[in-house]
Every structure is written in C-alpha cells, then in structure tokens.
Image: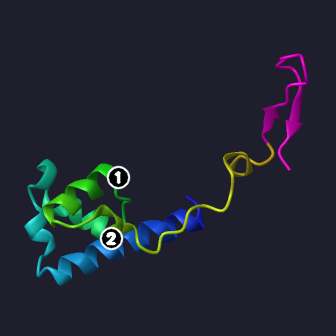
Amino acid sequence: MTIQAKAARELIAGNVRAELRRRGLVIKDLGGINNRSSSYWQRRTSGELAFEIDELIVLADFMHMPLAVFLQGVEPPEVTPHDAIRGKPRPVFPPNRLHATHYELAA
C-alpha cells in the first residue's frame, strides 16, 4: 500500500467517525447493516481496514447523507497507471504495424 493510499484510507475512516459523532451514533449502531457485525465496522472506522465503495454507499444511505461527505479531502493519485508500474515494459506500436515485440520502459 502506498503512503497516499494509507492516508486516504485513514481520512475516509476519520470522516465516517466524524459523521457518526455528529449524528449521535456509535459503532454498535452499525451492527447488522449490510449483514455485518459491529466489530466488522470497528475495523473499518479505525482505519485498520479500508472501506469498500459499496460499504460507504450503504453507510451514506443509512445516515441519509451524500456519499461525497465521506470522501472529503481525499486527493486523486498524482501518478498515471503507467507510472505506478514504473520500470515495467509496455508495448509501443510503430505506425502502420501492430507488433507486440516492440517495448519501451516507462520513464
């Protein structure tokens, strides 16, 4: 996991905890939502495990709020998919020929 992904995971968990507090809810109140136990939700709201997007959608619906509230402050990655696999070859197709033996290394 990248540092940026970990920071996003912790920020989202913090946003969920903040919304729970604003609404006077506790983790026990989440037990049973989406057929999950309160300990399951505890691991996510603590940032120990990342939320799946469908879990955030269910929570937003449960709390009658927009999903975007949980994502406030999360920045998109600054790298392209090819940057993320830096050093791995990717095919370069010469004009007029699609030949998979031509490769260049991502810079």
For the residue pair 8 and 66, the one nearer the viewer reads as 66
- Image coordinates for residue 15, horizontal then vertical, percent: 33, 75
Q: Identify the mark nearer the N-term, 1 or 2.
A: 1
Report helix, strand or loop for mark 2. helix
Give the crowd class for mark 1: few <14, some 14-19, many >=20 residues within 10 Å: few
Q: Residue at x 19, y 83 (%)?
A: 22
Looking at the image, is 85 positioned above or below residue 61? above
Of the residues shown, which amino acid type is indicated by label 2?
Val
Report helix, strand or loop for mark 1. helix
Looking at the image, is 101 positioned above or below residue 10? above
- Image coordinates for residue 98, horizontal then vertical, percent: 83, 17
Marks 1,2: beta carbons within 8 A: no
- Location of mark 1 (residue): 53
- Image coordinates for residue 106, horizontal then vertical, percent: 83, 45
Is residue 47 at all visible to an observer of this figure?
A: no
Q: Residue at x 8, y 55 (%)?
A: 32
Of the residues shown, which amino acid type is indicated by label 1?
Ile
